[in-house]
């Protein structure tokens, strides 16, 4: 696991990624869960196009052979599954097995990415509706798929990535301005204005029992079949850092919490 620093702009980020790729075997694989990396910039649910576009552009500048993998089309709630399948037309998905998803379970336990949890659950066979912290997602028979495509094909879909390659902004702010200009969505404002989550008092978890927690979660689930652990924590007045302890209270080690029989 490496920390990339984009503060000095696109070329600097590209050099970091290139050095990482050289040390790790000379190939780059980008994995995007949900598929908004294939954005055209005008989809109604789009909310975070900048990071993906910056990654595509930086990998392009490395000159290192790169493959983009779309995992679980639509699972991040930004672009509709059917629209993504149209953009992936003709590509046969890879289908990871349960053993592969289980290998990520330890990471999901402490870093509960909702999109990753949805994909892992779909690989394990979960289907139906899921209440996330932001929206309702549908797990379908398409959800477990992993679709590989060449970097240039992904860039061809993404106007922000193409503009970043053409303009080569020298700072992170300048790169975010390019994305904002093309999509109308601020690239960094949501991160800079986000209120830091404070750890909840330990007694907040200690006073919870499973029956009380489950009753409260059913009331916030909007009739869905499952909820994410992040939604569960938020509904109970906890933060994402409380999720490992919340798992113990709810006696679950699965990616999602199932609410229906």
Image (cartoon, grey):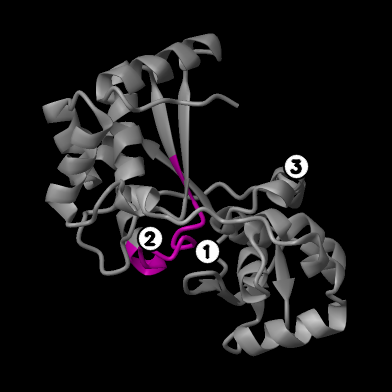
Q: Residue at x 36, y 59 (%)?
A: 84
Task: Say which quarter of the image contains residue 11.
Answer: top left
Which is closer to the viewer, label 2 or label 3? Answer: 3
Report if the CB atoms under discs 2 and 3 are less than 8 Å apart. no
Label 2 element class: helix
Query: Is the residue 59 above or below the residue 208 in the image?
Result: above
Residue 86 can be seen, yes or no = yes
Q: Residue at x 35, y 63 (%)?
A: 79
Image coords of residue 135 (percent x, y)? 47, 74
Local packing at callout 3 (Cα closer than 10 Å; few below 14, some 14-19, many 20+) is few
- The range drawn in magenta is 69-83
Quadrant position of the C terminus in the picture: bottom right
Q: Which residue is mark 1?
A: 142
Give the mark nearest the N terminus, 1 or 3: 3
The residue indicated by pointer 2 is 85
Q: Disc 1 vs disc 3: which is toward the camera?
A: 3
Q: In the image, 246: left or right of 143?
A: right
Indicate yes or no whether the magenta region holds residue 229: no
The answer to whether 253 appears left or right of 125 in the picture is right
């Amino acid at each position: 696991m490496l920390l990339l620093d984009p503060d000095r702009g696109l070329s600097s980020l590209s050099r970091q990624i290139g050095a990482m790729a050289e040390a790790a075997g000379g190939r780059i694989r980008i994995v995007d869960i949900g598929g908004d990396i294939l954005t055209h910039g005008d989809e109604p649910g789009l909310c975070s196009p900048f990071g993906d576009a910056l990654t595509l552009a930086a990998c392009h500048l490395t000159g290192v052979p790169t493959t983009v993998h779309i995992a679980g089309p639509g699972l991040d709630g930004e672009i509709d599954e059917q629209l993504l399948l149209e953009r992936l037309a003709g590509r046969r998905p890879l289908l990871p097995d349960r053993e592969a998803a289980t290998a990520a379970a330890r990471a999901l336990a402490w870093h509960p990415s909702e999109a990753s949890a949805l994909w892992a659950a779909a690989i394990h066979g979960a289907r139906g509706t899921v209440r996330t912290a932001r929206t309702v997602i549908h797990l379908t028979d398409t959800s477990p798929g992993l679709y590989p495509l060449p970097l240039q094909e992904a860039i061809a879909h993404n106007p922000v990535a193409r503009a970043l390659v053409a303009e080569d902004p020298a700072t992170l702010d300048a790169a975010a301005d390019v994305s904002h200009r093309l999509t109308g969505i601020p690239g960094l404002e949501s991160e800079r204005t986000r209120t830091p989550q404070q750890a909840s008092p330990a007694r907040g978890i200690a006073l919870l029992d499973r029956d009380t927690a489950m009753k409260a979660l059913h009331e916030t689930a909007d009739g869905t079949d499952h909820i994410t652990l992040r939604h569960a924590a938020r509904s109970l007045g906890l933060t994402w850092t409380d999720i490992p302890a919340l798992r113990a209270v709810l006696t679950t080690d699965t990616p999602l919490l199932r609410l229906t029989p």
